[in-house]
Image: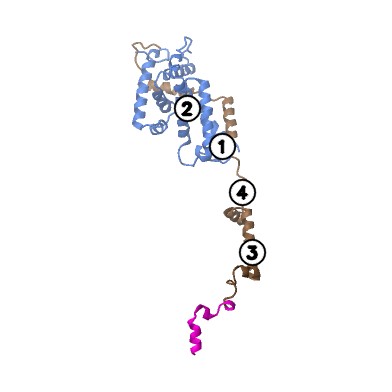
Chain colours: A brown, B blue
Amino acid sequence: MKMAEKKAFDEAELESLFAAARNTGPQPGADLIARILVDADSQIAAPVAPVADRKGLVAAVLATIGGWPAAAGLATAAVTGLTIGLVTPDTLDTLSGGYLASASGVYQLEDLLPSYGDLLGEG
Amino acid sequence: MPLDALKDVSDDALLVAYGNGDADAARALTLRLTPRVLSVATRMLGDRAEAEDVTQEAMLRLWKMAPDWRQGQAKVSTWLYRVTANLCTDRLRRARGVGLDTVPEPEDDTPGAETGLQQAARAHALEQALQHLPERQRQAVVLRHIEGLSNPEIAEIMDMSVKAVESLTARGKKALAALLAGRREELGYEDG
């Protein structure tokens, strides 16, 4: 490129060069566009399934406690608790040494407050 | 959905839609952003094939980033220009020592003075001269004077102060004016 004693471009002339570059800029061909769209398709997120937005309260609770296995465990515990409460099996009484039976059948007031017996005797 | 329906939708919203699985948004973004990326890459690299590779890579990074994009966090085009600039810089560094010496000199059969041809000749001459500028000057001049970005946006893309951008573009233009001085007549400017 010649760098002879020539007048340098002024601001307006340079701007006309930039304008020429803007008007004749490279345009992407169909092949490049196609390659980019193939990439876009390969990276696209899986659409969110509509049912996922309509989960009910049960699903929300299940998700919170850990799914169906947790729900099954919870149900078993509830039924067991109800059974113990209603039936009070003998085996449970044995295991707990009778402490879970009604207080009136096991302890008298003197057992818990010995001086109460003396008071009765004096009376 | 017809693409016309998306012409008023912002880049930002389209990117979020693509991140949520909308393929039409990807088409609209591709048609909108690819010419800009290709323009910068071509002028930075001076090589169409390399520029196309960079354009595809920059757009691929956009697709990968889409699911994490938060609407309003930044301008999509600024992010993309920045990625493009970095990709170009990487390529230029790998090819350093080859580029400047192999930039073709103007051909003898440069188109004549007819208006359309003169425009093409001027653009061609400018692009050749751009390849002789230091990389950062070239980048700043292309973004400011060809892509028409603001100095603050260029500062963000190039990770420098606005003052530094102003200085780079001023020096770049001065260098271009000197580089092209010998071709005034050929490009249809009065000489002297």
Q: Give the range drawn in magenta.
A: A104-123
Q: Does the magenta stretch include residue B24?
A: no
* Circle nearer the N terminus (2, 1): 1
Looking at the rendered image, the disc whose residue lies closer to the viewer, 1 or 4, is 4
Specify few, some or many for label 3: CA neighbours under 10 Å numbering under 14, 14-19, or 20 or more: few
Q: Which image quadrant: the N terminus of chain B?
A: top right
Cβ atoms under marks 2 and 1 closer than 8 Å: no
Residues behind callouts 3 and 2 on a single chain: no
Quarter of the view holding residue A56? bottom right
Q: Where is residue A33 in the image (x, y as percent from the top left)?
A: 57, 28
Q: Residue at x 44, y 23 (%)?
A: A19
Would you name the residue on which mark 1 appears? B25
- Which residue in the structure is indicated by mark 3? A80
Q: Nearer the viewer, mark 3 or mark 4?
A: 3
Between the residue at mark 4 and the residue at mark 2, the CA separation in whole angstroms equals 40 Å
Percent position (x, y) of residue A74? 61, 59
Tags 1 and 4 on a common chain: no
Q: Is mark 3 on a helix, strand or loop?
A: helix
Q: In the structure shown, which secondary structural element does the residue marked by tag 4 occupy? A: helix
Callout 3: chain = A
To which chain does the residue with label 4 belong? A
Camera sees residue B32: no
Q: Do labels 4 and 2 share a chain?
A: no
